[in-house]
Image (cartoon, rainbow, N blue to C red):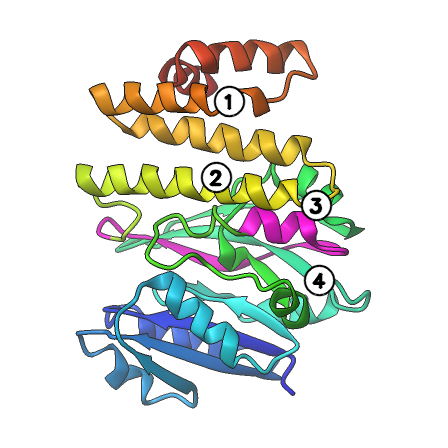
Amino acid sequence: MPKFSIIIPVYNVEKYIGKCLDSVMNQTYQDYEVIVVNDGTKDSSMNIVNNYDVKVINQKNQGLSAARNTGVKEAKGEYILFLDSDDSIEKDLLKELNKSLKNNPDLVRFQVQEEFEDSTEKKEYPEKAFTNKTGVEAFSLICNYHFVENAWCYLYKTEYFKKNHFSFKNGTIHEDYGLTPLVIIKASKVNSISYIGYNYLQRPNSIMSQNNYEKTKKKVNDFYNHYQFLIKEINQTKLDSTLFKSFIANSLILKICELKGKDYKAYKKKLKEDKVFDNLLTDSLTHRIKKLCMIISPKLAKLLIQ
């Protein structure tokens, strides 16, 4: 059994997949398997992938969620790491992660830096490390990080992930928001290391940066459905979910600000009817003022927060 299973979904990334795989092959810690899920790519990505010693799974195009879920089913490693095919990892990431496994955690958080296409510039996001926290304790710290719900900035114990039947919702956008907060808070033991090991590529034509209003409406709708799922799931636990509910509610309220005119007004009304605003924290004067601003005008509140 390898220590790590690195799952890489591939779809139309011929420009990036070579660098991605090179970053994996150049790891200073070598006890891992690489699972490339060919999600029906239409370009020459797989011609590049075939030059590497990796396990390839071919499937019809179903989207990122389905590709990740397929990879999880095939994973043989003790721990799982998700790597997007246009991103890369630093050479010591697996070595540093391996050092953090002595207390047998369900989840390990590592840190991220942004890279920019056609630029050597990098923007680091250092975060404070911690060890041996419960999921609830870890969530209270991680929710203040710059990146929170992105699936690729965590290492997951395979047994924990599969035993809980975690999966990304197929056919949706923002699938990370719809799962990762739950994975964090339900964990028994969580570590976070300060090592900045993930290179998150910012490119103008990625799925998360396309300026298509119909796609924006789908993003918001998917976000709302993810929120409903998270509320249902957390309500089935006995965990302290006050901060969790506030975090996912805050994210959803800010998300509807991407809508225009009647669409924005309709969702604002919907969120009031579904009592989403009720989940916002009111444990301090600052939080009470913020909640009031959110209720009156999410768009205004977003400007004030920025």
Q: CA distance from mark 3 to mark 4?
A: 18 Å
Identify residue type, mark 4. Asp
Where, quadrant-wise, is the C terminus in this rendering?
top left
Q: Residues within 10 Å of mark 3 (few under 14, many from 20)?
A: few
- Residue 7 visible within the image: yes
Percent position (x, y) of residue 114? Answer: 42, 50
Q: Residues within 10 Å of mark 4 (few under 14, many from 20)?
A: many
Q: Residue at x 58, y 64 (%)?
A: 165
Q: Which residue is mark 4?
A: 106
Percent position (x, y) of residue 286? Answer: 62, 12
Q: Earlier in the sequence, mark 2 or mark 1?
A: 2
Q: Check residue 204 for magenta coloring.
A: yes
Q: Which residue is mark 3?
A: 237
Q: Residues within 10 Å of mark 2 (few under 14, many from 20)?
A: many
Q: CA distance from mark 2 to mark 1?
A: 12 Å
Q: Are marks 3 and 4 in contact (CB under 8 Å)?
A: no
Where, quadrant-wise, is the N terminus in this rendering?
bottom right
Q: Give the left or right position of residue 86, taking residue 240 as reference.
A: left
Q: Check residue 251 for magenta coloring.
A: no
Q: Identify the secondary structure beneath mark 2.
A: helix
Q: Earlier in the sequence, mark 1 or mark 3?
A: 3
Percent position (x, y) of residue 31? Answer: 62, 84
Magenta part of the chain: 180-205
Closer to the observer: label 3 or label 4? 3
Percent position (x, y) of residue 276? Answer: 50, 25
Report the front residue among 214 and 152. Answer: 214
Q: CA distance from mark 1 to mark 3?
A: 20 Å
Q: Which mark is residue 275?
A: 1
Q: Are marks 4 and 1 in contact (CB under 8 Å)?
A: no
Q: Earlier in the sequence, mark 3 or mark 4?
A: 4
Q: CA distance from mark 3 to mark 2?
A: 16 Å
Q: Which mark is residue 227?
A: 2
